[in-house]
Image (cartoon, coloured by chain):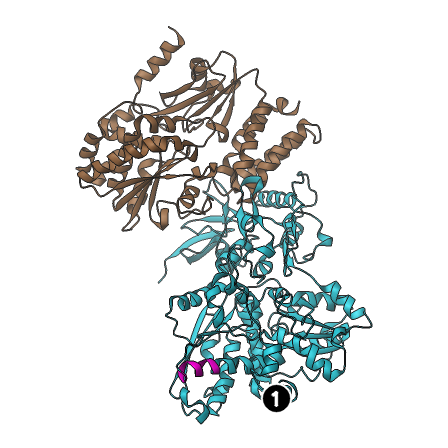
Chain colours: A cyan, B brown
Amino acid sequence: MEAMVKIKINNTPLRVAQGTTILDAAKELNIKIPTLCYHPDLCIAGSCRICVVEEKRARTLLASCCTPVAEGMEILTNTKKVRTARKHIIAMMLSEHAENCVHCFKNMNCELQSLSREYSVETQNLINICKPEELDISSPSIKKDFAKCIRCQRCVRTCADLQHVTALTAAHKGSEMKIATFLEKPLAEVVCTNCGQCVNRCPTGALTEQSYVEAVWNAINSPDKHVVVQTAPAVRVAIGEELGYDPGNRLTGKMVTALKRIGFNTVFDTDFTADLTIMEEGTELLTRLKKALKDKEPAPLPQYTSCSPGWIKYIEHEFPDQLEKVSTCKSPQQMFGALAKTYYAQKAEVDPKDIVVVSIMPCTAKKFEAGRPEMWSSGFRDVDYVLTTRELALMIEQTGIDFRNLEPSHFDSLMGMSTGAGVIFGATGGVMEAAIRTVYEIVTGREIPFKNLEVAPVRGMEGVKEASLKLEGCLPEWDFLEGVELRVAVAHGLVNARKVAKQVEAGNSPYHFIEIMACPGGCLGGGGQPIPTNCDIRLARAKAIYEEDESMELRKSHENPEVTMIYKDFLKEPLGHKSHKLLHTTYTKRKKY
Amino acid sequence: MTKTDIINEHTKKVNLIFEDCNCWDIIDKVLSMPPDAVLSDINASGLKGRGGAGFPTGLKWKSAKEQPSNERFVICNADEGEPGTFKDRQILHERAHKVFTGMTLCAHTIGNVSKGYLYLRAEYNDLLERLQKDLDEFNEGLKARNFPFTINIISGSGAYVCGEETALLDSMEGKRGEPRNKPPFPTVSGFKGKPTVINNVETLVYCTMIMLIGPEEFLKLGTKDSRGAKVFCISGDADVKGIYELELGMKVDEFVELFGDGDTKAVQVGGSSGHCVPRKKFSETFLGFEGVPTGGSMMLFNSSRSMYHVLHNYLEFFQEESCGLCTPCRIGCQQLLRGIEAVKRGEKPSTYLDELIAMARTMRIASKCGLGQSVPNPFISIVENFREEIIY
């Protein structure tokens, strides 16, 4: 039994567990205390001081986010002293902040702006001390506008605690203190993985995605361009949050209609290439296992997944010696781009030079991935523009669509059909589950022996998940796998990825196959998803993803008829010559600085 | 009697810090005492921390001792960065053994301490070689006595904020020196998360001397709230400058009489983060915890000085030395500095000073650590007492 302490908040007596912060204790009474540097996903900083409250015996105000309750505390959250202090603090922040709200990407979705309204900071008497000169647009993914930074260090803590990347850190002190990269180099030249988790947690517009909305409008408005759009699985369960829905709404059909209304010529689904990825990557895994177990030759195991571009950049910097273990499969986005400008171009009889491929992604790292020099296998840049879920919502608004009242519609055919296996790519463990559904069936000729095709151990929000599956009754072609315990692991968030990769580095990793997603929760918690994010929101999105899977007629990648068709008509076979050229890639060893 | 004679009278009365003594005798005596008895002596002496904050030393030791742990640490805070303070340097130069002894006594008292650290201000690195030599001998001496405790020196990196004890801990752990959230206090979770006592150089020497002369002798000095004596660093427009150990409880007018040049208009007590006492308040202001507390710095200003420049200088210092972590301190320091400049230039009305004072009051109660909380001390005391000098 946890020790309890008796306190009073705004004269209401309360008993809470020892160690509870004042902020959390106040929540129990439905008292909201404003916060800025606090974020539920991150360790406590206690630096912005906006959450200060009065305690009768204390000499100073107390920051409620970082002060644990103590027996007999009498806390007041809304006294003149508290309000005055908060007003001062907001005014101070505003004096350091570029107040050009109407021109800001985060206009109306800015925590500083909301607080300023809430506390009626109507006049600004303080002297403007904003340093406007530093705008870093070097990265294709993330824009860093220091003039809007309030030094809350949420980004720093995100980069360190959740991602173990520390591309961003606090530098200098006093008035010169800033959030900087190593040696204040441009973001594009440091270890940044472009994951955008910092963007998701920045309370202001200091960190945003590089926006390509105008470029996409230009393409749509060019009569000689044929604009093809693809949407990632995690977008459909999150787009609603930007449009006034609660988290966890599945809006696939409405989203497709909206995309058509916006004016895209063809609306396809990245889930299609997710299914295709399973065919390629599953076959690759089986090939590696065969090499190791049957031919007794060294094979690059465990095999890492390659769908997450944040993870790819991370491993290139942090564990370059392990790159051979990464599946050579391109991510579904890039497979799609290469096929859109070859397979689709042929079928639709459009000159690939006129095709513009746009992706709607829950991700900022995809913007970087699309620009990688190796992603030109169609002879053109495979994916031209990548928009985040947030940017798509903006385009929907700009189009003047009454989203709630839209009739749902279907993706266009050829590369628009998907299975439940493709959908769950959007959640951590989803790629693994999809792979298991297919690989097991290829090897044994039977469906996986789990109720409802659910591979429960790889689902959920635990940082590193593991599972094993004994392969029995294998088909003759796969007899070398008979009795083999297939061991897999799933990690999400780079801090967890690191744990798994360290194990591989030490040579004691027990796994055959490891799924890694750079972002907490997988793509549904991606850096391009609606803001705010927290564990509850991510769980709601995950629930929606699995519901979407369950609602689908086809649940296994190898059953996708359009996948079957593309192999028959175009690719011939997994890991074949054409696949190799269009669907597989290489990686680059990078340094840490 | 000349001034020097009077000052000599005063310094003869109390000579605890710089007096030479045989530290090994003290150590042998204390190591044979039960730790609780040592603690009880330190408690009885009424000694409060001499770094400026004045936390009762016995209470600090007791808190660390009572925190269950198989490992505790003792740290000497020699990050003497407060402008106008230069006593610890002299103590380390002349009487380092007494500092090491104080740390050893503390280690014995709180128990389970195998390592102590002296966190030395980066600017004092010229002392390093000699200190290390003294320390090596000292550590040998402890070894010979089979007392399992060694002291190491850690050199700081030059940030003022690292004198704040939790920023000091972060700095020692190789992190960026920023104050931690409190609670937990260092005595509960300090260096490497272990219970840690962090004492100022001078405090540790007083501990040594209390164990030599006994708490009763110490209690005879000073006042009820400010027991004992204190080392003062006198600078500015003073006839007599330097380092003097004086009994606590002196009034500012008495002090100015002794050290001033006859034209003192203000005394900045406690360095740039302390209070400015104007002439009209000299007779009513005590130097001690019941009046204006001080870490030792006494800066005297005569009528030729512009208090605007004095304040400007302090604020420039603070806007650079704030760690930049918390909003009130990082931005507040800049706003106060730019604010008085704007008033001086006529860009802001003189009433803007009142807004700045109100903002400074927020800094005092909302800043994360002692740095931001004490910037308002010089600001408010100088602006309130020398308003005309700020405006015109």
Side of B355 relative to A166 (left or right): right
Against B260, residue A149 (above or below) is below
Image point (45%, 64%), residue name: A498
| Residue at the spot 37% in from the left edge and 60% down from the top edge | A2
Specify the amino acid type for callout 1.
Thr
Q: What secondary structure predominates along the stretch shown in magenta?
A: helix
Q: Secondary structure at mark 1?
A: helix
Q: Within the image, what quadrant is residue A421 found in?
A: bottom right
Callout count: 1
The reply to whether residue B99 is visible in this rendering is yes
The residue under the point 54% across, 55% down is A167
Q: Using the rendered view, name the quadrant where residue A392 is placed.
A: bottom right
Q: The disc numbered 1 marks a residue on which chain?
A: A
Q: Is A459 in front, or is B372?
A: A459
Q: Position of residue B287 (x, y in %)?
A: 42, 24
Q: A246 and B18: which one is in front?
A: B18
What residue did someone put label 1 on? A564
Q: Is residue A306 magenta?
A: no
Image quadrant in which the N terminus of chain B is located: top left
Residue B111 percent across, percent down from the top left = 25, 44
Q: Is residue A377 left or right of residue B372?
A: right
Please say if B173 is above or below B305: below
In the rendered image, is residue B190 in sight? Answer: no
What x and y, as percent, mark residue A548?
59, 80
Quadrant position of residue A540: bottom right
Q: Is residue A432 above or below residue B383?
A: below
In this view of the protein, which residue sits in the foreground, A327 or B359? Answer: A327
Part of the protein shown in magenta: A287-295
